Image: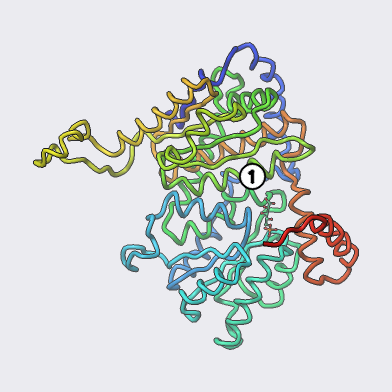
């Protein structure tokens, strides 16, 4: 059964150019699998499709009765949740009735923006709301700040017996949140120690909120498991699209195309591009290397970005994604009686899905005409099974690309630096030196300040 198709003739000038990557990719792929078996740092995502997710379902069973669920987290502890929610739940899920929705309303608090925080408070009835607090490290200032606000509010308004409204997802042994779980006895799930934030969507981090929204998580994992078999067993550029995508990304990067535009022709995949951007940027942007991910959604960005893509600088590699069949479709009228609308007869009797797919093909054709490198990915449909395939596919491509670039795709020193300065600015004890250091950098910014 085909899980996806990648057509990349228009991103390839010479097939031989890619062959040089084959051996390297083969060893990288084997090394990843071996590292996963040994439980090495960062490689735990490889075995997530085979995990036992009973505990997730049990916790979901408790949360499902609430009116609302608020997930508090940031980066890898929120983007995957948003992605699953938007790809698979109804686009206006929170506006549906309880009978239609089946699960609680869902809100994500992934910033320390007071407006966002207050707006969530205004939308929920605290006594009928469950909270999922996710932080692998348990030290992320943004997540902990939002957590403190709601924990304090819960206790103030609901008394002391509120631990049952809170589910914590964190490291199995370490961090503030693990200690908090031990102290309060609230229910918790584990982020396996060797699974990094941006690779954690198929762990309890992503699965819990998905389960309460009625997303079949068994299907997500089945898709991931099926594609895993193919990705690790197909050992040639001829039959492994992930290898080709990775090799082409590096080849174009080395030719100066250091931007990677990912443009699915599906509104529901807008958050998927956000999730992918984090995966690509945080895994590959290090040691002076990296390809800037650019998010676009078709056909919307045809009317915004495609002018630049076709006629701007040749510094981008494009990946256009389309879905072969949608679950539902909209048909245009066979004809209309107003003469003024006759010029639209080319639309009569046609349907929206066909049109959307022609839009994707039009952009591909326009890019090829402008001599820009473009790859075209087609997926049979966007359901839980194929989304599981897609998630795992991109995680694999990212990890392989990191190996090809000679860097560690599983760390994020640049993110940690910013996190540490935030804690220092907010007055964390022992971080006085870091605060002074950050302030001295800010003085550089202030060397030229213009008021208006
Ligand atoms: O991928 C990563 O490691 C990061 O983006 C983290 O997910 C993010 O910083 C949040 O970290 P934590 O889950 O420890 O709060």
Q: What is the image's colouring?
A: rainbow
Going by the image, does 310 lie left or right of 300?
right
Going by the image, does 442 lie left or right of 228?
right
Location of mark 1 (residue): 45
Residue 376 or 439: which is nearer the viewer? Answer: 439
Let me know if residue 349 appears in the view. Answer: no
Image location (x, y in percent) of residue 291: 66, 35
**Image quadrant for the N terminus?**
top left
The structure residue drawn at horizontal position 57% and vertical position 17%, both measured from the top left corner, is 12
The correct choice, above or below, for 359 with respect to 65 in the image is: above
Let me know if residue 101 appears in the view. Answer: yes
Which residue is situated farthest in the right direction here?
A: 433
Image location (x, y in percent) of residue 221: 51, 45
Q: Ligand 1 lies in which image quarter?
A: bottom right
Residue 440 or 138: which is nearer the viewer? Answer: 440
The structure residue drawn at horizontal position 55% and vertical position 87%, both measured from the top left corner, is 157
Residue 90 or 10: which is nearer the viewer? Answer: 10
Image location (x, y in percent) of residue 270: 48, 47
Going by the image, does 200 lie left or right of 265?
right
**Image quadrant for the C terminus?**
bottom right
- On the image, which quarter does residue 451 sit in? bottom right
The correct choice, above or below, for 341 with respect to 24 in the image is: below
The structure residue drawn at horizontal position 70% and vertical position 38%, both measured from the top left corner, is 284
The structure residue drawn at horizontal position 47% and vertical position 65%, both measured from the top left corner, is 106
Binning the other alpha carbons within 10 Å of mark 1 as few (below 14), some (14 to 19) or many (20 upward) gives many
């Amino acid at each position: 059964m085909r899980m996806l198709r990648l057509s990349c003739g228009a991103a390839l000038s010479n097939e031989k150019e890619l062959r040089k990557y084959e051996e390297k990719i083969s060893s990288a792929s084997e090394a990843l699998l071996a590292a996963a078996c040994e439980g090495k740092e960062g490689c735990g995502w490889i075995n997530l499709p085979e995990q036992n997710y009973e505990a997730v379902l049990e916790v979901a069973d408790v949360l499902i009765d609430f009116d609302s669920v608020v997930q508090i987290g940031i980066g890898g502890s929120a983007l995957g949740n948003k992605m699953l929610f938007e790809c698979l739940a109804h686009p206006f899920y929170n506006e549906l009735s309880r009978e239609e929705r089946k699960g609680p309303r869902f809100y994500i608090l992934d910033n320390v923006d007071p407006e966002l925080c207050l707006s969530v408070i205004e939308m929920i009835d605290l006594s009928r709301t469950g909270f999922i607090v996710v932080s692998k490290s348990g030290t992320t200032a943004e997540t902990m700040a939002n957590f403190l606000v709601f924990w304090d509010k819960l206790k103030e308004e609901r008394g002391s017996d509120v631990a049952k409204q809170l589910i914590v997802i964190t490291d199995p042994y370490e961090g503030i949140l693990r200690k908090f779980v031990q102290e309060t006895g609230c229910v918790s799930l584990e982020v396996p120690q060797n699974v990094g934030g941006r690779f954690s969507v198929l762990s309890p981090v992503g699965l819990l909120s998905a389960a309460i929204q009625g997303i079949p998580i068994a299907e997500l994992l089945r898709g991931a498991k099926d594609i895993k078999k193919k990705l690790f067993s197909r050992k040639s550029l001829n039959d492994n699209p992930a290898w080709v995508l990775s090799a082409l990304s590096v080849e174009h990067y080395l030719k100066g195309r250091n931007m990677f535009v990912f443009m699915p022709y599906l509104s529901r995949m807008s958050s998927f591009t956000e999730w992918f951007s984090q995966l690509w940027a945080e895994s590959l942007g290090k040691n002076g290397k990296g390809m800037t991910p650019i998010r676009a959604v078709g056909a919307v960005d045809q009317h915004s970005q495609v002018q630049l893509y076709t006629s701007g600088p040749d510094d981008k590699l494009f990946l256009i994604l389309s879905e072969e069949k949608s679950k539902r479709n909209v048909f245009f009228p066979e004809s209309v009686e107003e003469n003024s609308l006759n010029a639209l007869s080319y639309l009569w009797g046609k349907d929206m899905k066909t049109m959307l797919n022609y839009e994707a093909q039009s952009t591909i054709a326009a890019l090829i005409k402008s001599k820009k490198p473009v790859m075209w990915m087609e997926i049979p449909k966007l359901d839980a099974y194929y989304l599981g395939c897609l998630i795992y596919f991109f995680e694999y491509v990212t990890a392989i690309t990191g190996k090809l670039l000679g860097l560690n795709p599983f760390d994020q020193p640049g993110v940690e630096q910013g996190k540490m300065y935030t804690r220092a600015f907010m007055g964390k004890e022992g971080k006085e030196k870091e605060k002074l250091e950050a302030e001295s950098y800010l003085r550089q910014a202030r060397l030229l300040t213009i008021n208006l």
